[in-house]
Image: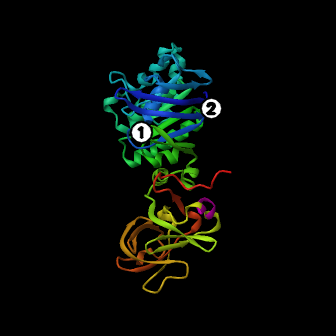
Amino acid sequence: MASLSLDRVAKTFPGPIRAVEGFSLDVEDGALVALVGPSGCGKTTVLRMIAGLEAPSRGRIALGGRDLAGVAPRDRDVAMVFENQALYPHLDVERNIAFGLRLRKMPRAQIARRVQEIAERLDIAPLLARRPATLSAGQRGRVALARALARRPKALLLDEPLANLDPRLRDRLGEQIRRVHAEERLTTLLVTHHHDEAMRLGQRVVVMRQGRIEQVGTPDELYDHPASQFVAELSAPTAINLLVGRLEQRGDGLRFRADAIVLDLPAPQLECLADRSGQPVVLGIRPEHVALVSAGGSPAERGTIPGRVEHVERLGPDTWVRVRVGAQCLTIRAGPAGSRQLAPGQGVALAFPTDRLHFFDPATGKACRPPVG
């Protein structure tokens, strides 16, 4: 095990195509960090540079304090699990797992013990005599993971290990990755374009966009304090409601107005928005944070905003309600209590918890933060 450090790493391909630019990240010894972002944002390129399959155009990569510049892939003590698993089709599962150990000329008895140990841990011990072609996608994924884990590398790189699996298998293999990581304590980087995998598995999450880091933080930090509109949209299982409006001065305070939605902002919000009075701003609020406080045709309660139900979709314990407020349309995640009576055309009243509002600059997409100093 070892810490991993990337300092201002960049990768440019002929074109020129800037796949990665100014990537800096420190991964603590034994940590599991998830890289998430849309296809083509540079996630896999970062892993390939760490593994030595691509050479950085600029910057420094160090593992356990050792600069990896000029170090051949086989000498880095890094294991990588590819999206397509890359298993040897002519070898059975046992020999696939043992392949790296045999290259290291480990004693046969020791190889056998390690293969059996890791196979039992990943629930593939009954498959040891089978070849990859006879396995399901989930089974092949576990074999590829077992092969990478068997030799106890200093760093483990997982490139879309749950891709192409159905949701049930993704959840199961994801839980096994988390459990094995806790037991082995390997420094691990996991690449995914599924935000739910990143938020569920990563102790820290790196959000990437167009080759650059947009934000690094714990799952809670990304969810509660997104640094940009892009992160806010990527760090939750459902799309955040985004309302384009304007800030108005109201005495000593500020008011947000977007058509029929008018919100008086509390003191904590004023610090980061004080210099934006009269300017356009984007308000973000997650579907689970908009409250349906009343239903029916009666006027909205004080401090709430009236709206009308357009669509109701019930998925198990959750009810998703589409509500129109003037020209704006919001998605609300409602609990089972009282939501069974909701129907299209029905009047409702909405409450917006002011401590759950996010504000973004419409030009840059960056979150509005208090001024420094």
Q: Residue furthest bottom?
A: 298
Residue where numbered disc 2 is placed: 29
Residue 202 in view: no
Q: Is residue 172 above or below residue 329?
A: above
Residue 154 in view: yes
Question: Image point 48% across, 69% down: which residue?
Answer: 335
Question: Image point 56% across, 63% down: which residue?
Answer: 356
> How far across and how far down the image is residue 114, in percent?
53, 24
The answer for how far apart the CA atoms under marks 1 and 2 are is 26 Å
- Judged by its main secondary structure, the magenta piece is helix
Q: Nearer the viewer, residue 102 or 64?
A: 64
- Could you tell me which secondary element the residue under label 2 belongs to? loop
Residue where numbered disc 1 is placed: 41
* Numbered mark located on residue 17 in the image: none
The part of the image, by quadrant, that contains residue 124 is: top left
**Residue interval drawn in magenta:** 270-274
Task: Answer with mark 1 or mark 2, whichever residue precedes in sequence.
Answer: 2
- Could you tell me which secondary element the residue under label 1 belongs to? loop
Query: Which amino acid type is shown beneath numbered disc 2?
Result: Asp
Q: Nearer the viewer, mark 1 or mark 2?
A: 1
Bin the neighbour count of mark 2 within 10 Å (Cα to Cα): few under 14, some 14-19, many 20 and up: some
> How far across and how far down the image is residue 70, in percent?
51, 16
Verify whether residue 140 appears in magenta.
Answer: no
Query: Which amino acid type is shown beneath numbered disc 1?
Result: Cys
- Colouring scheme, one of rainbow, by chain, secondary structure, one colour: rainbow
> How far across and how far down the image is residue 22, in percent?
51, 34
